[in-house]
Image: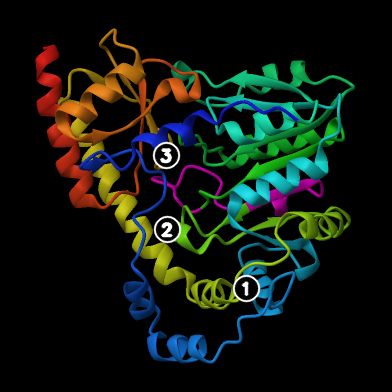
Amino acid sequence: MKISPFKVEIWMNEHENDGIYNLTESCVSPLKMGELLELLDIKEKYLSDLLDMKLDYGDINGSDELKKQICQLYETAEPCNIAIAQGAINANEMTIMELIEPNDEMITFTPGYQQVSSLAESLGAKVIELELKEEKGWQVDFDELEKAITDKTKVICVTLPNNPTGTMLSTQACVRLIEIAERHDLYLFVDEVYRSLYADRFCYQGSLFDLYDKAIITSGLSKSFGLPGLRLGWIVGPKAFIDRIIYRRDYHIISISKMNDVLAVEVLKQKEKILSRNRDICLKNRAYLEEWIKHERHITNSFTSGTTQLIRYDMKIPSEELSLRVQKEAGIFFVPGSCFDCEYHLRLGGGIDPVIFQNGLNVFSNWLRQFD
């Protein structure tokens, strides 16, 4: 099974530790362990439980309490609809490997996160990538989507909000997406790992799991919760599909860490404390970006509801070359648009520590003056 190089992850692995200002990270600024335990007011209890914990496999499919807490994120989910994964990326992997057969057709959108498309192609599927156009606010063209569906189409895949564009759908658009999927009896595979990271309230706030009975949702604690170090993700879907995932898990991960299970339960019990902190960071950065971009002559942006943005620059320099130059000369780390097949763009993260975000953009402005 051959698979295409994962461009964004390769770029991150090779370059992200070489800059002073990481302006491209798509997670919300992670908490330190001590900060998290203090915020949740569980430091003494958690450390006591940790020292008394037997390091066996634990609950192979995740603890009942963990699945119960995940259900609270959805209106209609029950524990039988939940499968636990090692991060959303593992949830995506297991979903695609269970869902896709050779010669299936899958529709997805570009620019987007490469994992799902490349993995499906490696399994022998035909992947149809529909372009999100900047001049249309990176929004889905539903007429184009309907025309792309054939009798071999099995699933429509979307990430909401999108990585890297931040695209989110309105309630009306979500209803139309579901109507199309339902009319053609298609699965709807939605990566919702950025759910709750909205910079405005003009988009659908819920989960598509609660709107469509053939929706399969992946998510986790890495992005909107800002806890990528926990490697805790999940799949939410129809019971029959989740039953098959549970059998598949034995070949992929067996179980997650007991330590992560216990801490994830505490995080989800007090989720509003963490989500409130993270939304405040994103909104502060969004406000600063909107003012900054008004005065930066070389940068434009089609603002979306998400916090991650794909900003455009006006210099005729390939994005990989520009990213390497700005990192070497100014210490600023970006993922180039070429990693998303979208030249003359840079991915800008919206959940970065506000001090780093503001200082980094100011340094970037100074560096851009050479192109005036």
Q: Secondary structure at mark 3?
A: helix
Residue corresponding to mark 2: 226
Task: Name the residue at 73% across, 64% down.
Answer: 254
Residue type, mark 2 in image: Gly
Task: Name the residue at 39% across, 91% down.
Answer: 44
- Who comes first in sequence, dot 2 or dot 1? 1
The secondary structure making up most of the magenta span is: loop
Q: Report how far apart the C-alphas of labels 2 and 1 lie in the structure.
A: 17 Å
Residue corresponding to mark 1: 69
Q: Report how far apart the C-alphas of labels 2 and 3 lie in the structure.
A: 19 Å
The tally of labels here is 3
Assess whether residue 253 is covered by the magenta stretch. no
**298 displayed left or right of 275:** left
Q: Position of residue 17 (x, y in %)?
A: 30, 43
Q: Which residues are the magenta region?
A: 196-218
**85 displayed left or right of 313:** right
Q: Report how far apart the C-alphas of labels 3 and 1 lie in the structure.
A: 33 Å
The label on residue 13 is 3
Quarter of the image for the N terminus: give it. top right
Q: Nearer the viewer, residue 55 or 63?
A: 55
Q: Secondary structure at mark 2?
A: loop
Q: Nearer the viewer, residue 67 or 89?
A: 89
In the displayed orientation, state which residue is furthest to the top: 316
Residue 354 lies, with reference to residue 367, above or below; the image says below
Residue 105 lies, with reference to residue 222, above or below; the image says above
